[in-house]
Structure formats: structure tokens, C-alpha cells
Amino acid sequence: MKDNGNMNSEIRSDAAVPKTPAGSAVLPLDSSFTVEVTGWYRDNRRNLPWRQDKDPYHVWVSEIMLQQTRVEAVRDYYQRFMQALPTIEALAEAEEEQLLKLWQGLGYYNRVRNLQKAARQILQNPSAEEVSVDPSVTGFASAGFPRTMPEILALPGIGEYTAGAIASICFDQRTPAVDGNVLRVMARLTEEEGDVKSTPVKRSFTELLADLYPDTDCGDFTQGLIELGALVCLPNGQPRCEMCPVSGFCRARAAGRVMELPVKAEKKTRRQEQRTVFILSCGGRLAVRRRPKGSLLGNLYEFPQVSRHLTAGAAVSQAEAWGCHPLDVTRSKQYKHIFSHVEWDMIGYYINCGSEGPGETFRWVSREQLEEEIPLPSAFQPFCPE
Ligand code: ADE
């Protein structure tokens, strides 16, 4: 092969460097960045139910829900939750089964248990009985809610992100809330090469942002960054840089690298488990049981299930062992359910039974009870009979 010499190879390597878009010299992140983000947020923010006021109860519950699923899915969950439990007092007094039902499908059920623990803790605060006089807080749902970062962080289930969101949105403090959206925005703005999930990278973004917070309307800056990540600086696909109010500050854009960032460490592989689920019916009622406390989905309900995939014959024997007198059996479709650390490869059998078996084995419930009262996690929903 012919060597073209240094000159030519230099030209070739230059040609491989993506072109900086015309007029996109990178600006330093300073107060003009903050002004752009907050101004853009005010003009473009989505009208979401938890943005109707700055009540910390509302912001808190919504932020915990938003850690679990998409904004569109949270709308309904949030509205149902607030209708059922409109105040911190109502949350503190709710039955566990009601809480779990309101959370059904969101996953990570300890989060709603922690909401209740924190509500009880807030109500022990001596100022909880006074109605707040801060005009930015309704005072109705949130009397006694702590206002400083250390106090908010001391509540069960509240980490840096949620505390930063509550303190900035509700109490106008200069406290960053760095979620996945903000990590992506910041990684692109700063052309960060490190793993965005790592503590040093998160910490460096938090410190950088803390210096950029405005003196007032801190919540607009927090939510502006989140909203930019959700609507403009998109994951999985081409971000909408042409609509971005801060593209002039973006190092990744200037370097033509927006699709390469953020860098994320490879996810750990999940353990695979086979499960066989039993949909046992008797006289129009279905068998459910509580899962053991402390286990995955602990204390929630399930259709009875065993590990491994059973044949129809083995499933019938199992139903007999439970004392249910199986009459006929039909196999369900196969489903996969993915948790954070484990994947269930699930098959099921619909078994009509001649008897409910010994009383203590299962709770037999009507379809209405199953729908209205029983917290049945998403993993089992595909097996609910039509
Ligand atoms: N994701 C996390 N927090 C959010 C918020 N307050 N609004 C919309 N999406 C969010």
C-alpha cells in the first residue's frame, strides 16, 4: 500500500473530526445560561397536575412517582393518589393495603411505604399543627413540612435529588436536582466523558449547577433543566438542538458529539428465573395470597406461583397438593417481567377448582375485589382472566 506521507494523513484525520456548526462558538456557563433556561421554561413548560402550586406534598409525591415511570403515566397515578389522600395527614393515616393499591403498577413499593413513614415523621414535628403562612405554600396539605435541605434529607425515602427538587421548587432554595434528564443535559453541555451515573460526575454537575442558580424562582431553573431533557435534549435518538435555548453553550453540539453522550456504564445482567403462576378459580372467585414480608414485592398479593416451569400435569398435582380439587386446566401465554435485578420468565395455568381448599392457604376474592382492593403487582396482571 502506498504511504501518502504525513501531510496527507494529517488531512485525512482532520476530515474525520466532525465540523463545528457555523456560528456555534461555545459560551461559558454563566448567569446568561440560567436566564435562557428559566425563560424558556416559562414559555414552554407542560401543564402538569403537580405544577399547579408549590405545595411540598404535591411536589414530593410527584417526584417520587416520576422516579418510576413516564410523565404521561404519572398524571393518572398522581391524580388518583391526591384524590384518595389529599393531605399529609390522610397519607399518614392510610391503611397499607390502600397505599399499595394506589401504587399498583408503579413498582418499588417501598417508596410508597417510605412516603407514609415520612408523613408520620412530619406530623410529629411540633410546627405541623400550625398552618403555614408562606403565600407560596397552600398550607393546606403541607403544614409542618421541613424547609431546609438537611431536614428534608432526613425524611425516609428522600435522597439528594428529591430533596433538591422540593427545596428549590417549593422553598426557592438554590439546590440542584440532578435526575436522568439533567445528567444528560449537563453531560452534553460540558462534553463530559465519564460515566454519568458515577458519584464524581453527579457531584461535579451538582456543584456546577449550584453556582448557576438564580436568586429567585429557583424552581423554574430546576424544572427548566428537567424539561429541557424531556422535550429537547432527548435520549435515544436525535436531540432537537435546533429548538434548544442553550445550544450556544453546548460543547457536545459544537464538537458534533451529541449522539455519543452521555456515557453510561454497561448495565449488570439480570438473574433469570422461571415461574409458574396458578390462576385458580372456584365459583367465580380467584385465589390470591400475600407474598412474604421482606421478599421481592413483599406483603403484596400474588396469584399462587412456584419456581420453574411446570407441565400441565405437574400443575394439576400442585393444585391438588393445595387441596383445590382441579377440574380442568388451560395454559396461558408466556410473559417476561423485568425487575431491576431479576427477570421472571412466567407461564401460567388457568385451573377451575371444585373446592377452595383449606381456608388458610389462599384468600379467595371476586373480580371486583381484585380490581378495586387487592394490590396485585404488574407481574401478575397479564394473567388476570378477561
Ligand atoms: N421528571 C422529574 N421531575 C419532573 C417534574 N417536576 N416535571 C416533569 N418531569 C419530571
Image (cartoon, grey):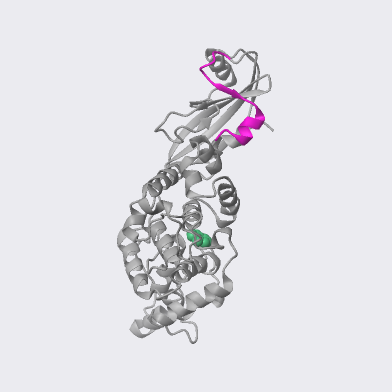
Which of the 4 quarters of the picture holds residue 340?
A: top left
Left or right: 159 as drawn, with respect to 386? left
Left or right: 352 as drawn, with respect to 109? right
Residue 293's place in the image compared with 87, above or below, is: above
Q: Position of residue 135 (x, y in %)?
A: 48, 66
At 60% across and 64% down in the image, what residue appears? Answer: 47
Does residue 373 show up magenta in the picture? yes
Between 111 and 201, the residue placed more toward the observer is 111
Using the rendered image of the protein, determine whether residue 152 is visible from the camera's viewpoint. Answer: yes
Span of residues in magenta: 357-375
Q: Position of residue 59 (x, y in %)?
A: 49, 58
Between 33 and 278, the residue placed more toward the observer is 33
Q: Residue furthest bottom?
A: 23
Residue 167's place in the image compared with 115, above or below, is: below
At 59% across and 34% down in the image, what residue appears? Answer: 373
At 36% across and 78% down in the image, what residue appears? Answer: 3
Does residue 265 show up magenta in the picture? no
Between 357 and 217, the residue placed more toward the observer is 217
Q: How many marks?
A: 0
Q: Position of residue 239 (x, y in %)?
A: 53, 69
Residue 249's place in the image compared with 176, above or below, is: below
At 38% across and 54% down in the image, what residue appears? Answer: 127
Quadrant the N terminus occupies: bottom left
Q: Position of residue 69 (x, y in %)?
A: 52, 52
Quadrant the C terminus occupies: top right
Q: Residue furthest front?
A: 130
